[in-house]
Image (spheres, rainbow, N blue to C red):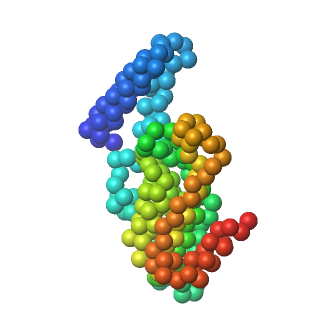
Amino acid sequence: MNKQCKDIDQFRQAEIEASIRNILIAIGEDPNREGLKETPKRVARMYLNEIFSAVPKPNEELISEFGKTFSEEDTEGAEKFGDMIIVRDIPFFSTCEHHLVPFLGKAHVGYIPKDKVIGLSKIARLVEAIAKRPQLQERITKDVAECIMQMLDPHGVYVVIEAEHLCMAMRGVKKPGSSTVTSAAHGAFRTDQATRAEFLELIRKR
């Protein structure tokens, strides 16, 4: 890490620490009491290194980062691509941009390759990376589908996400256990009802 990047990270860390300390004071807490002394520092590290770590990265950078693919020629002994590939039940955590409280759930990602495939773990890592921002579930769903389309140019992509939002469970309507389902379809999954139905049947099977 060069000095400029290190200086930026230290600045961001200090700014978040000061902001969390001010929030604690504003809600009537004492940030100097034993249980809260290290809280601003812990929250700043968590924001920067974990739950908001993808904020500085545009989707184009994520595509470049995860976009190493295996072409048909590079896959020794493989039959011609064309069958559906699904990575199901990918757990993820994100943070609602409206109230900055968590939402969590599972993503199901399927695509029909044309002449390129991607490592299965990279699909899970892509979901995780896109979720590490203040987010909307609808945007995560759309961005995952669009990134895979750009990386692989497949015959089609289908992404379905199911999640529970703590902003609905802890506040507002206070309905814990309710879930939200979003989907994004491209290519064959949008135009071919049988293909779409096959995907939905496969992600429902347990």
Q: Is residue 138 visible?
A: yes
Residues 165 and 199: in front is: 165
Left or right of 192? Residue 175 is right
Residue 97 location (% of width, % of height): 43, 44
Residues 189 and 11: in front is: 189
Left or right of 169? Residue 128 is left
Q: Is residue 156 visible?
A: no
Q: Which residue does the image show at 54% across and 13% down from the upper left?
A: 34
Look at the image and tell me in which quarter the N terminus lies: top left
Residue 24 location (% of width, % of height): 45, 20
Q: Residue furthest front?
A: 173
Residues 26 and 53: in front is: 26
Q: Quadrant of residue 181?
A: bottom right
Left or right of 53? Residue 84 is right
Q: Residue furthest bottom?
A: 80
Residue 110 location (% of width, % of height): 55, 71
Number of marks: 0
Q: Which residue does the image show at 50% across and 39% down from the upper left?
A: 101
Q: Residue furthest right?
A: 206
Above or below: residue 165 compared with residue 78? above
Above or below: residue 122 compared with residue 154? above
Q: Which residue does the image show at 47% across and 44% down from the upper left?
A: 96
Q: Which residue does the image show at 43% across and 57% down from the upper left?
A: 139
Above or below: residue 131 compared with residue 205? above
Residues 108 and 67: in front is: 108
Above or below: residue 79 compared with residue 131? below
Residue 89 location (% of width, % of height): 63, 60
